[in-house]
Image (cartoon, rainbow, N blue to C red):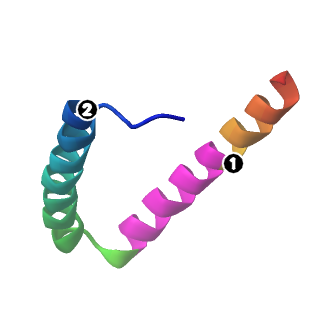
Amino acid sequence: GGLPDVWTLVFCMISTLIFAQIASLCANKAKPETLNRITGVILVILGITMIIVNKVK
């Protein structure tokens, strides 16, 4: 490990902030049940992905 590319780091920080604002606008308009379902689906997908990645190694 050396230092990360500064421009890439800045781009990631700015895009994270922008998309977090967009996501918060969508989340404020959605019903809590819908948000819970979306969160559950994302967690299941992440879990399956982690299992697959660990099995491939």
Pinpoint residue 41: horizontal percent, then vertical percent.
54, 52
Give the distance between the C-alpha atoms of the residues marked 2 and 1, in whole angstroms. 28 Å
First in sequence: mark 2 vs mark 1: 2
Instruction: Tell me if residue 3 comes above or below residue 40 in the rendering.
Output: above
Mark 2 vs 1: CB contact within 8 A:
no
Pinpoint residue 47: horizontal percent, then vertical percent.
69, 48
Question: Residue 8's mark?
Answer: 2
Seen at 22% across and 58% down, the residue is 20
Instruction: Tell me if residue 34 comes above or below residue 5 in the rendering.
Output: below
Q: Is residue 15 left or right of residue 33?
A: left
Which secondary structure, mark 1?
helix
Instruction: Tell me if residue 4 comes above or below residue 29 in the rendering.
Output: above
Pinpoint residue 57: horizontal percent, then vertical percent.
84, 24
Residue kind at label 2, given as amino acid type: Thr
Seen at 18% across and 38% down, the residue is 11
Pinpoint residue 5: horizontal percent, then vertical percent.
30, 31
Residue at the far bottom in the pictured view: 32
Which quadrant holds residue 9? top left
Residue kind at label 1, given as amino acid type: Gly
Question: Residue 47's mark?
Answer: 1
Which quadrant holds residue 48? top right
Which secondary structure, mark 2?
helix
Q: Is residue 2 left or right of residue 11?
A: right
Q: Which residues are magenta?
A: 33-46
Q: Nearer the viewer, residue 6 or 8?
A: 6
Residue 44: in magenta span? yes
Residue 34: in magenta span? yes
Disc 2 crowd rating (10 Å Cα; few below 14, some 14-19, many 20+) is few
Give the label, 2 or 1, closer to the camera: 2
